[in-house]
Image (tube, rainbow, N blue to C red):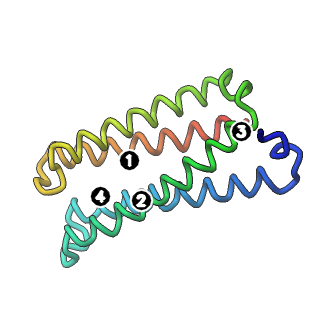
Amino acid sequence: MLAWLPSHPWAHPALEVVHIAGIALLLGNLVLLEFRVFGRGAELPLAALARLALSIALAGFGLAAASGLLMFASQAAELLANRAFTLKMLLLLAAGCNAAWFHGRGSLARCDGLARAQMVLSTVIWLGVLVCGRWIAY
């Protein structure tokens, strides 16, 4: 199905660029929202900023997921044997569970201590995803 991907000289680098751009949009907007919740930019309305930041973060996740799936499909056997890849997938699952918990309990509206802890945990998990992603390549 994707036999052309490994043999095309620009395919994998282009997918990596899309993947990194998606990660930047995702993590950058999550960190922006976290700064706002922790008091930076208090003049910005939290609800409006959250709608914008989370929609851009979701678009970034979509880019990263789509490009990541294509890269995975081109070298599935090698990646499944890679411990950094396995850890990255587990961290992605943890990030999804944390996000579901965050939004399920209405943490953004509460902005309580648990909401702040969830936001910090989210950032730490996503940084772990980044580290694992770099380890996959080496």
Q: Nearer the viewer, residue 92 or 3?
A: 3
Amino acid type assigned to the residue bearing label 3 in the image = Ala
Q: Against 5, is 31 above or below?
A: below
Looking at the rendered structure, the secondary structure element under dot 1 is: helix
Looking at marks 2 and 1 on the same chain, the residue that comes earlier in the sequence is marked by 2
* Marks 4/1: CA–CA distance: 9 Å
Which residue bears the numbered disc 1?
A: 123
Q: Amino acid at mark 1?
A: Thr
- Which corner quadrant of the image does residue 46 belong to? bottom left
3D distance between C-alphas at marks 4 and 3? 29 Å
Measured Cα–Cα span from mark 3 to mark 2? 24 Å
Vertical relation: 81 (above or below) 72: above
> In which quadrant will I find the C terminus?
top right
Which mark sits nearer the N-terminus, 3 or 2?
A: 2
Q: CA distance from mark 1 to mark 3?
A: 22 Å
Comes first in the chain, label 4 or label 2:
4
Q: Mark 3 — residue?
A: 137
Q: Amino acid at mark 4?
A: Glu
Instruction: Name the residue tied to disc 4.
Output: 34
Q: Position of residue 59 (x, y in %)?
A: 46, 60
Q: CA distance from mark 2 to mark 1?
A: 13 Å
Mark 2 or 1, closer to the camera: 2
Above or below — where is 71 with respect to 24?
A: above
Give the residue displayed 42% in from the left and 57% down from the top: 58
Secondary structure found at label 4: helix
Find the distance from the CA under tag 4 to the CA under tag 2: 13 Å
Q: Which residue is mark 2?
A: 57
Q: Residue at x 17, y 49 (%)?
A: 107
